[in-house]
Image (spheres, rainbow, N blue to C red):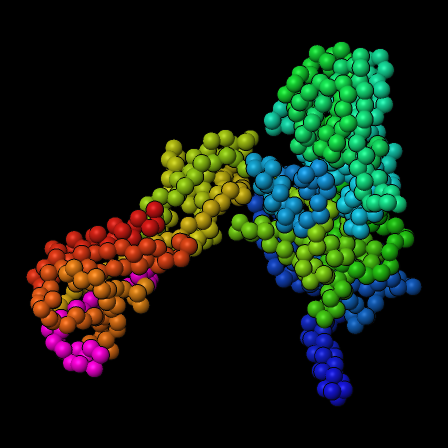
């Protein structure tokens, strides 16, 4: 047994060694365009994959090399470099997209989720937007040590929803702007102003009126507004205990949200709540999912009524008041104005980082690591700075790494993780950064589907500020433009019984092509089942060891795409209740079945054929259809043709 274990270990080492050598085949020399930062070096040897995504977003997967710090700053020999796999997303400042940090906060709690689940959650709550790509975000309370557990480390604000607003250290928060300037990614210091705010909003979360809240869980003074909510605490008896907030508002105007859409009591100075005012109760113990406003402010009191929808949160103020999307980083600036810091984590790990070029282009990166057998080593902070410089970034920030590092794109309608998470699978994270876009609103459907063509109808219901001059639909990487003032286009030369994915796009007034995220799919029809002949002849067949004179029914048919399960074609003659299975006759090369001639069946008056349709787009075989041949001995072309038409019509019903 010991010898066997030793041999297995040796073979494993040999496999890992040679596998690593093969994967880590090195270039002949260090190229001239190697980048350098804080003693570390980085360069890309080869692009392994490129995906041009909608709205000009570009995904790349590169094979690269890195070298950690050297004492004298000299370029190291190539055999001392580590191999790296780098996935990146590049987004121009002019792209019609938004960067939305997102977290899953259902049921009034933080819920750790995989990035693909976070992306799907966002799309379900904001169906007017579509996700193009995403990376994981900030660090989070992975071990549930906080009183209100699973919180992100820092700010998480998406589309103006500040789910968590606490500011970290001077490098710990970044915000996104999309105002046409190069100021697309900003570093928000911990000294930035925060304002506890009450917003009156409509169903689309448009702010109709905004008020500053002066106090939290304290009685408001003259002209003041106060917010009240319960909080969590960790005690020696139990973890994550919720303490309801008991209040008495006698003499004050109160507005209570009793069933919040979301209420997040992150801490004594960090709260997010959204919901509809349900009561004016003056005394209440606020439970989980509840919060209240006590007001001495006459203007606010004149604006609020029962059924008013409100949002309460700490917004950024001052020079960052326009920031609607912000997220915490893992406490590290990797590059600022082209310069790298001289200190940082020296260990190599999987990493997720974000950077900005001088022209405002934003770059997102995931570097795989902890998978030495695949040649995925990971980078130190200095290596990350060198990587950012290689890709022409001037600013860069570190996000959560390790097993959390995830980059996904939407490809052919599905979320696809393009990197190799070091846990062996996607980790559930606290939040992420989504790249999203708002497509024009289209009403579209497929029509006139055949085995080799389809018509796709599309009408623009709302352009959502897109400059649409010519609409097109793309199938099989070929674009088909809709003629002016027409809403249909026909796609020819398709394969039968095949799945096709299609997406829309348009040309703008500058003749630029913009691919959209609106998409669909269809199956082309199978080739129709065709009956060429039904022949009935007399012959002899063996029935249970006895040769008997029989009626032999032979069915000749074409079944190119196997829309009919030829192993399940059944027949019945006259009014007999017994069904007969058609089987392949190797002597005559047709499917047939036989019925003994007898006093019960002296002749054939009627033949019924049962056909079970098997269509790829259906959930399993569909119910049988029947074709009836009356007096089949005199079956002529007209009768056969009528039967074929009936068959075709039955098949078409399946597809429609």
Tell me the quarter of the picture where residue 591 sits: bottom left
Q: Is residue 175 left or right of residue 40?
A: left
- Which corner quadrant of the image does residue 536 belong to? bottom left
Q: Image point 82% across, 45% down: which residue?
A: 239
What kind of secondary structure does the magenta stretch mostly adopt? strand
Up-down relation of residue 244 to residue 533 (above or below): above
| Left or right of 428, for residue 223 | right
- Seen at 87% across and 40% down, the residue is 170
Query: What residue is shown at x 60% (from left), y 54% (from top)?
Result: 416
Q: How many marks?
A: 0
The quadrant where residue 288 appears: top right
Magenta-colored stretch includes residue 551:
yes
Q: Nearer the viewer, residue 421 or 604?
A: 604
Q: Give the magenta range.
A: 538-564
State the residue lying farthest toward the front: 599
- Quadrant of the drawing holding the N terminus: bottom right
Q: Is residue 338 visible?
A: no
In percent of width and height, residue 423 lies at 72, 61
Q: Is residue 362 one of those drawn in magenta?
A: no
Examine the rendered structure and indicate whether residue 640 appears above or below residue 90: below
Identify the residue at horizontal 11%, vertical 71% (top origin): 597
* Residue 394 vertical position relative to residue 289 in the rendered view, above or below: below
Residue 441: percent from the left, percent from the top?
50, 34
Taking depth in this image into account, of 360 and 28 the one nearest to the observer is: 360
Position above or below: 16 against 382: below
Left/right placement of residue 260 relative to residue 633 reads right
Q: Residue 315 placed where, x, y %?
A: 77, 29
Instruction: Report the side of 373 relative to 347 (left or right).
Output: left
Q: Estimate the x, y position of residue 642 in percent, counting from the top left.
A: 16, 53
């Amino acid at each position: 047994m010991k010898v066997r274990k030793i041999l297995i270990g040796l073979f494993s080492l040999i496999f890992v060694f040679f596998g690593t050598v093969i994967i880590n085949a090195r270039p002949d020399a260090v190229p001239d365009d190697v980048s350098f930062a804080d003693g570390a070096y980085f360069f890309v040897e080869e692009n392994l994959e490129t995906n041009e995504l909608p709205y000009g977003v570009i995904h790349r997967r590169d094979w690269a090399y890195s070298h950690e710090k050297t004492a004298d700053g000299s370029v190291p020999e190539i055999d001392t470099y580590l191999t790296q796999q780098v996935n990146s997303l590049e987004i121009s400042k002019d792209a019609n997209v938004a960067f939305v940090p997102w977290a899953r906060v259902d049921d009034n709690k933080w819920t750790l989720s995989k990035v693909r689940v976070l992306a799907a959650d966002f799309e379900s709550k904001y169906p007017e937007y579509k996700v193009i790509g995403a990376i994981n975000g900030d660090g989070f309370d992975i071990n549930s040590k906080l009183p209100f557990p699973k919180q992100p480390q820092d700010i998480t604000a998406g589309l103006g929803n500040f789910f968590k607003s606490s500011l970290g250290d001077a490098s710990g928060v970044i915000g996104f702007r999309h105002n046409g300037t190069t100021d697309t990614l900003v570093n928000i210091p911990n000294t930035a102003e925060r304002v506890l705010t009450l917003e009156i909003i409509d169903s689309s979360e448009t702010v109709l009126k905004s008020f500053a809240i002066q106090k939290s869980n304290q009685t408001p003074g003259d002209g003041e507004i106060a917010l009240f909510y319960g909080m969590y605490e960790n005690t020696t008896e139990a973890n994550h205990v919720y303490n309801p907030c008991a209040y008495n508002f006698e003499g004050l105007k109160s507005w209570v949200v009793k069933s919040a859409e979301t209420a997040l009591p992150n801490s004594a100075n960090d709260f997010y709540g959204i919901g509809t005012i349900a009561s004016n109760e003056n005394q209440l113990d606020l439970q989980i999912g509840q919060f209240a406003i006590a007001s001495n402010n006459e203007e606010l009191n004149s604006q609020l009524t029962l059924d008013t929808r409100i949002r309460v949160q700490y917004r950024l103020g001052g020079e960052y008041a326009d920031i609607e999307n912000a997220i915490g980083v893992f406490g590290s600036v990797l590059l600022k104005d082209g310069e790298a810091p001289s200190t940082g984590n020296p260990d190599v790990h999987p990493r997720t980082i974000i950077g900005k070029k001088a022209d405002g282009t934003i770059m997102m990166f995931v570097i795989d690591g902890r998978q030495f057998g695949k040649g995925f080593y990971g980078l130190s902070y200095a290596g990350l700075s060198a990587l950012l410089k290689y890709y022409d970034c001037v600013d860069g920030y570190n996000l959560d790494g390790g097993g959390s590092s995830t980059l996904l794109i939407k490809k052919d309608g599905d979320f696809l993780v393009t990197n190799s998470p070091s846990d062996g699978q996607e980790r559930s994270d606290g939040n992420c950064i989504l790249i999203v876009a708002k497509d024009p609103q289209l009403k579209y459907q497929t029509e006139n589907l055949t085995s080799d063509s389809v018509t796709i109808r599309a009408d623009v219901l709302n352009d959502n500020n897109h400059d649409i001059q010519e609409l097109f639909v793309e199938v099989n990487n070929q674009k088909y433009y809709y003629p002016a003032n027409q809403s249909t286009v026909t796609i020819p030369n398709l394969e039968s019984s095949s799945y096709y994915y299609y997406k829309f796009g348009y040309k703008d007034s500058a003749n630029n092509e913009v691919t959209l995220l609106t998409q669909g799919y269809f199956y082309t029809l199978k080739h129709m089942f065709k009956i060429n002949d039904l022949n009935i002849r007399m012959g002899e067949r063996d029935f249970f060891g006895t040769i008997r004179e029989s009626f032999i029914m032979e069915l000749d048919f074409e079944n190119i795409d196997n829309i009919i399960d030829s192993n399940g074609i059944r027949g019945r003659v006259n009014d007999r209740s017994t069904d007969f299975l058609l089987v392949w006759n190797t002597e005559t090369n047709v499917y047939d079945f036989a019925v003994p001639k007898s006093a019960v069946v002296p002749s054939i008056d009627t033949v019924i054929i049962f056909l079970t349709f098997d269509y790829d787009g259906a959930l399993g075989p569909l119910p049988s259809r029947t074709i009836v041949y009356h007096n089949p001995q005199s079956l002529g072309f007209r009768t056969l043709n009528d039967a074929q038409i009936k068959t075709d019509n039955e098949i078409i019903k399946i597809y429609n």
